[in-house]
Image (cartoon, coloured by chain):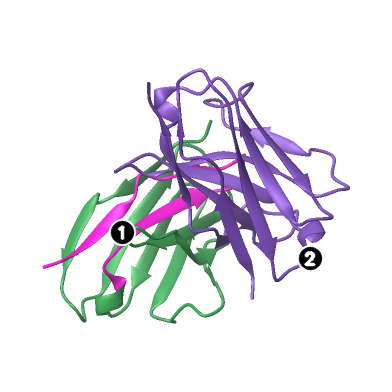
Amino acid sequence: EVQLVESGEGLVQPGRSLRLSCTTSGFIFGDYAMAWVRQAPGKGLEWVGFMRSKPSAVITQYAASVEGRFAISRDDSKGIAYLQMNSLKTEDTAVYYCTRWGSGNSHQYFDYWGQGILVTVSP
Amino acid sequence: DIQMTQSPSTLSASVGDRVTFTCRASQSVSTALAWYQQKPGKAPKLLIYKVSTLQSGVPSRFSGSGSGTEFTLTISSLQPDDFATYYCQQYDAYSTFGPGTKVEIK
């Protein structure tokens, strides 16, 4: 059974950093690109970014709202994806979902999602 | 960036109704269009990808159609479990979600 489980601290002050982890099981992690999607309270879904698995010409891409502040990485040996969030703003408050590309490295639709983790950025 | 819109924002319907809602892209996304269902407090669930391909395990009452910039999701006979919010997503250029359509009990 495919499982994605997010973890990390839930409350952080503006300007600080936070790293989320996504621990996976039930599939060959190295065969799939992974992505992060967030949802602010009461709002819709917002794509954050992705990281393809190797070898790929383009490894990572990010939404304009997080470009330069957020970074996605992965440890294929452990089956874990990470979202490093720096210079956090109050508007980054959201539930963050770890997701798996449904097609390996080809097409960015998301067939499996984690349960989500609430990140609150507040003074 | 490709912008996505959905209509209506809210739809009131009864069990057994046939419901259709629309997703529009600001430019062509070819067939790179997916639909998700989300219930309160839960992660979204993939229903359809590549416009009309049903994800494994999704009931056949769900169907998708369209191409280019206009797409529809149809539920042929609404069931109690279908009251939720539905999002479309383009994945032709990076990824963008629509704002969602909430299906409520009439």
Above or below, A102 relative to B26: below
Q: Quadrant of residue B93?
A: top right
Q: Quadrant of residue B20?
A: bottom left
Name the residue type under label 1. Pro
Q: Which color has been applied to chain B in this rendered view?
A: green
Instruction: Assess whether residue A61 is covered by the magenta stretch.
Output: no
Closer to us: B45 or B97: B45
Q: Residue A112: which disc?
A: none
Q: Is residue A1 left or right of residue B57?
A: right
Give the magenta-colored segment's residue range.
Answer: B82-106
Quick one: which chain is purple? A
Above or below, A102 relative to B25: below
Q: CA distance from mark 1 to mark 2?
A: 30 Å
Above or below, B51 relative to B88: below
Instruction: Assess whether residue B90 is covered by the magenta stretch.
Output: yes
Residue at figure coordinates x 52%, y 80% from the top left? B57
State the residue position of label 2: A28
Residue A29 x %, y %: 76, 60
Closer to us: A7 or B101: A7
